[in-house]
Image (cartoon, rainbow, N blue to C red):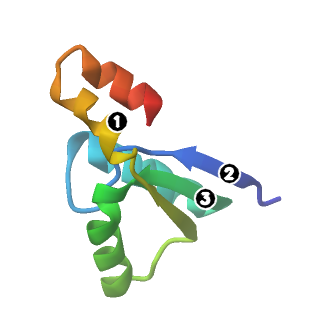
Amino acid sequence: MRLKVLLSVYACDPYQGSEQQVGWTWATQLSQSHDVWAITAEENRAAIERYNTQNDPPNIRWVFYQLPHWMRFWYKYPRGERLYYNLW
């Protein structure tokens, strides 16, 4: 039975390692047996679209999201980074 899965993966890039690779792996592994909708940061769009044109794209519907411009300043401050991620 295929489930419908909503996945929030802020860091998700098929060409990077560490946290970005973990997000990518979660999304692609889940998509092998489920219908996945993945919400990720807009900054990941170029890498994901490049991957999808060069390879068989995984069974994932991507939603790219970015906080409004006036809220992004939180990311620049060490204590504001956590708030930025929670708002995202």
Q: Is residue 65 left or right of residue 46?
A: right
Give how far apart the Cα atoms at labels 3 and 2 are.
6 Å
Q: Which secondary structure lies at badge 1?
A: helix
Q: Earlier in the sequence, mark 3 or mark 2?
A: 2
Residue pictured at 39% horizontal, 44% vertical: 10
Viewer-closest of 3 and 81: 81
Viewer-closest of 19 and 40: 40
Viewer-closest of 32 and 66: 66
The 10 Å Cα crowd at callout 3, few under 14, some 14 to 19, many 20 or more, is some
Q: Position of residue 45 (x, y in %)?
A: 34, 66
Q: Is residue 26 left or right of residue 59?
A: left
User: For mark 3, what is the residue?
Assistant: 37
Pointers 3 and 2 in contact (CB under 8 A)?
A: yes
Q: Nearer the viewer, mark 1 or mark 3?
A: 1
The amino acid pointed to by label 3 is Trp
The amino acid pointed to by label 1 is Met
Q: Which secondary structure lies at badge 3?
A: strand
Q: Earlier in the sequence, mark 1 or mark 3?
A: 3
User: For mark 1, what is the residue?
Assistant: 71
Give how far apart the Cα atoms at labels 2 and 1 are.
28 Å
Quarter of the image with the C terminus is top left
Q: Which secondary structure lies at badge 2?
A: strand
Residue 88, label in figure: none
Residue 5, label in figure: 2
Q: Earlier in the sequence, mark 2 or mark 1?
A: 2
Tally of numbered tags: 3
Q: Position of residue 21 (x, y in %)?
A: 30, 49
Residue pictured at 17% horizontal, 22% vertical: 77
The amino acid pointed to by label 2 is Val
Quarter of the image with the N terminus is bottom right
